[in-house]
Image (cartoon, coloured by chain):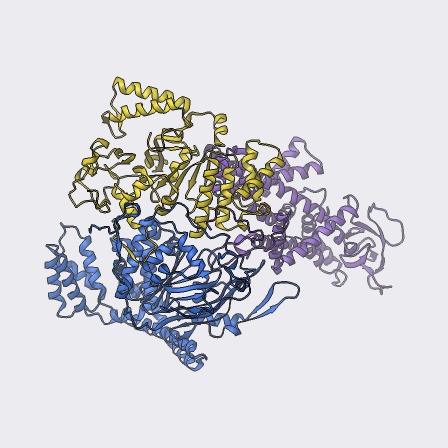
Chain colours: A purple, B yellow, C blue
Amino acid sequence: MSATGTNGIAEEALPGEGPPGNSATVTASTRRRPNPRLDQFKRTWYFFRRNTLAMVGLGILVFFVAAFVYGLVFQGPTTQLNLYCATDGAPSQSTCPAGNISVCTYPQGTTSPGANCYQTPVIDGIPYNNFIPPTMTTTTLGPLPFGALIQSGQVGTPYFYNLYAGLVKGTDWSLSISVAIVLTGAISGLLIGVIAGFYGGVVDEVLMRLTDIFLSVPQILLVIVVILAGQEIGITGFDNRILLMVGAFIATWWPTYARIVRGQVLVVREQKYVEAARASGASGGRIVRKHVMPNSVYPVFVQMSLDVGTVPLLIAAIVYIGFPIFPNVLWPEWGSIAAESTLTLPDILQECAILGSGSACPFPWWQLLFPGMALFLFAISVNFVADGLRDALDPRLRR
Amino acid sequence: MEGGTNGSQVVVSTYNLRKYFPVRGGLFSSHIADVKAVDGVTFDIREGETVGLVGESGCGKTTVGRLMLRLIEPSSGHTYYRPPADVVQKLETDYARLRDMPLEGDNGTPESSPEATAALRELDELATSHSLYRKSHKEMLALRSKLQIVFQDPFSSLSPRMLVRDILAEPLEVHHIGNRRERYQRVAELIQQVGLNPDHVWRFPHEFSGGQRQRLAIARALALRPEFIVLDEPTSALDVSVQAQILNILKQLQGEFHLAYLFISHHLSVVRAISDRVVVMYLGKVAEKADTHDLFVRPLHPYTQALLSAIPIPDPTLHRERIVLSGDVPSPVAPPPGCRFHTRCPAVMPVCSKVEPPLLEVRPRHWVACHLYPQGIDRASEAAPTLAAGSPPMLAGAGS
Amino acid sequence: MAIAESTITTEEDQLTGVRERPVPTTAAVRPAATPGEVVLDVHDLATYFYTYDGVVHALEGVSFRVRKGETVGLVGETGCGKSVTAFSITRLISDPPGRIVHGTIRYQGANLLWGLDREAKFKPIKNSKMVKVSRKFRRIRAANERMRAVRGRGISMIFQEPQQAMNPVFTIWDQLGEALYLHRGIELLDSLLAATPDDPEVGPALDAFVEAARPRNAEQARDAARRVAMAVQVPSFETELLQTLRQASVETDFDRPRLNSMLKRFRLTPLQRSWLRRERRRLELDRETCDIYLDEMRDGHLHRARKAAVRSQRLPNSLRRFPLRLWGINRHVQKPVKRELYWQSVRLLEGVRIANPAQVARGYPHELSGGMLQRVMIAMALSTDPPLLLADEPTTALDVTIQAQILDLMNDLKTRVGTAIMLITHDLAVIAEVADRVCVMYAGQIVENAPVRELFEAPLHPYTQGLIASIPRVDRPEKALFSIPGSVPNLIYPPAGCRFHPRCPQAMPVCREVRPPVTDEGNGHQVACHLYHGKTVEQ
């Protein structure tokens, strides 16, 4: 009866183990499952699904990603595509890449001939034909929800600005810049953190001091300085400026990851399985690759999802200060649109005051609300998803 | 050197192994003291035998295990793997010569004399050619497949994000043995040898129970066909019935593959069940070293006696006279002078706080480091020890 | 130190120092014939965990009794549900995912699971093994509130890793004092309010103490200290005197002025007195609430009127206390209480045989070793004189010699204090040392329940037999260890019928279908096995 190692009960299910009070959580199937990682993913998804806020965040993110794809595929290359000229039938004088929209105008004081007609002010008897006060109207220019047009007139100019299209195309820019920054920052931070944490000693000290240096640099200031310095050297041009901006952001972004990863590596390094690998003769590089990194990488995911929401806010801040990264303030990037709205607000109000009547010159609240909403929704949805992700991956909560 | 049937070859032997961990403190993290985790441990292990290394937590036994595998570097001392017979001979004579010489200073270095210097020089030459710690990286890599370890905690010794299949195949991969398919075949072989279902290679470690994980750890240790396995408290985290399964598997595998084990544990009952010889450690030094039967029937060192008396027996009808040791284990940073056990010893004598007792062969193949037994094997028949405070308890009534 | 004589003849099996225990040692603890009153009666307890992978049937029909002064050992492997049992009794199961599904747990007659069936509803989900649990959280919260009357006061618990059970940022005496104040606060405040430092007897008693202290005569000093404590009417003063004496070095004078200054802590200012009175009232109301809860659980219905009455008195009392809680005064009014708590915790530490209790009490948990911390935990648990102590693997994390000390301590406390202990462990040897009665658990069910000698001499259930046979013995050399084949079943899909049948060497066809009922084999020995079911009692 003494068992000598043969436990060949074929249908033996794996008993689970757990802290006292929580009993087994074990699958019963003993059939061959060639994809256990898929099961892990399904399990994570199950816990994620139960978190309402996270699902809401995910829904919003899905919408943003769809906008991203739409902007990439259906909207044209990024030029000032969102400007429509307002004509009253006559061929336009100014160049409007988006096209013309005929509008009807009638001088102030007369009755409106129809819907969607703009009242042009009459000053000293001269009708300001070229003046379209800020208005918001919606027209469908393509497949909903992406093809809507929220017209917004610009004071003193004969064209409309398609706010909505700008925001949709702006998703492209914002998302790609964010992802590029965060991904590169995370990867470089991961590498540096792993090296510092695993090898310790002088290497650790040096790398950590480097991290401290970069951590102490203010992000926005660095971007501005870098771009200005680039200009001095002669690096001009929109593409180059974007690259400089991304580079400057990455330089200040990676230290956070290095710190997180290093902390995790310090823990993982002491685990018995690392020692066991060393006892088998594994080299340092192999241990880092196969044991240390996969086990240290989870906090990075969570931090990445949080950071993705922060980047557009920072870019908006830079543009808001007035620093021109993009060709003009009407460039379809959330930040620049938001900045433009706020920056031109005093002018609009001034002009409106000159014109006098209130109804013809509403406060352009939509110019402020919608870009801000885009930024806000993106940041907050990403936050919810990050929280949900962290909870779903936490082994203690996966019961 | 000691123990084992004559003729069976020595697999691993260590001589005067010491490991001091520096304690850093003060303003500039300067080196202010040493934790003397292992302070002069000598024993050997022969082919096919199990040596049990026993002691409480903090006595350094885990460190000894790691030192013997060169997972950490020693402060001094040497370990030899399969030394040729003539090397063993020379080592024995040299160490015997050094031991008989008067010591000087705290470290116990022999006084300088031509004999001493010659002995030391020869030891150094032998070390350079054969000691584990002087081998190059490439040589170590080849040796590592012969020396393996199984850890105590089955929960953290397997990488949580790797499939069992990859965990078991890893040692093979590191040594570039075979191609992928052959490696996975060997994995299937291994997992059956430890009595698990081969379908289970597709799972993650956390899906297994403690006993099964320990079997996986054993399977991983077997992957490279080692000759010597250090078992660092492999069953301490397991239940009794699972422990019995694991011990049986270990014995079976030992018979099948002619393995030598170093079984580190603080459970004397488990050690008795599996070991051929036992080494008892206290605070970094060897207190007693003997065949299993000898140690349990006739424990000589007071610490061993206390340890034995402390073990609860699963039989409510038997009542044990317990020797309760006063106080806690002293800190290994500042071990007590003289015999390290004297602060808690129930049979302490004045000499114990001044002079450290040497490890002497008091009975055939039974070494003790205690002033109660001041003479070596020649005077063993007269060893009715006289004490100030009564005879040591637990001594067999018939003998003295 | 006694020298043991060995009575076993052959050297082969000799473990020196072992002799037959005088039969029966347990008789000294309680009288043999009459069983004591039942402190804890668990009947048909079932606890399930509703997890992602399915429903884990952790406990299924667990029933046992613990009598006054008895030590019951709950033995089983990892995963058999013994810790779940302990947590179910104190209702510390995290809900979700766990849930006590049915059963009664009677503590001194009060059913702790009263109202269980109304706390949650279970609805099976179609096409899946999952179950939807809709919990009425208000009822669960109310049940938790009711458990306050029991946890700590009636049923104390100590856990496996003492380092993790103590708060690292508070001193030892702070944590001991918290437990003391919570459960024995009324007595403590009473003694403070009634202290008589100016009693005429105190003077001469102190003189006697000083005299006994000089030549360091331990016996005399202790008697004198006791006299002083009685004169002052505060028992902890005795501890204070003796401890201060111990710590005073030989050279410094241990004299009257110093003792007089020690007496100062009993002289309360009117502000302090008023605060103490209000605090005492608050604690009294609290205790009344707990008693009401216990009565609710005993009688089986709510006592709304009584609770309302207590609540109505609570508000005026807290209003009267509020002015005294102003910042600055807080520390002043609480000082005598804190001092008293300190010395009482020192007394407790003395009781668990900790050397240097005064210094240890002032230290932090990280300064103590595992063995000492476990003693502190035992002191904390027993500080309230609970009728029942639950010990969840108290010695598993400790070394053998320290474990021996703790087990000795527990045996000693058993005889001194007389608490009923429910000891949960997987180590049968510990059970043999300490327990009076043993319940063996397997896969969430109790398979055998017997007095400890019975169990080891004649284990009936095949699992118990296998368990006992697989223990390596230090006093008997074994060539091969017996091990039970197979491993613990998956509790999501437990085996039908007897849960042990896949591993049982004596399994019969009926074992696969029907769960074996519990049969009484006499001598207080119960077993759940088909081998004994249906057998007529012949011998």
A108 horizontally vs C446: left or right: right
Image location (x, y in percent) of residue B40: 32, 33
Residue B292 appears in which quarter of the rendering? top left
Q: Relative to the observer, which residue lies in front, B244 or C41? A: B244
Image location (x, y in percent) of residue C136: 54, 71
B116 horizontally vs B250: left or right: left
C104 horizontally vs B183: left or right: left
Work out whether B338 lies above or below C250. above
Residue lying furthest front in this view? Answer: C538
Image location (x, y in percent) of residue A151: 78, 56
Q: Is residue A262 visible?
A: no
Q: Relative to the observer, which residue lies in front, C150 or C279? A: C150
Q: Relative to the observer, which residue lies in front, C287 or A218? A: C287
Image location (x, y in percent) of residue C76: 43, 58
Residue B7 appears in which quarter of the rendering? top left
Residue lying furthest right in this view? Answer: A90
Quadrant the C terminus of chain C occupies: bottom left
A328 horizontally vs C461: left or right: right
Q: Is residue A140 visible?
A: yes
Looking at the image, which residue is at 27% across and 71% down? C190
Work out whether C100 lies above or below B322. below
Q: How many marks?
A: 0
Residue C314 appears in which quarter of the rendering? bottom left
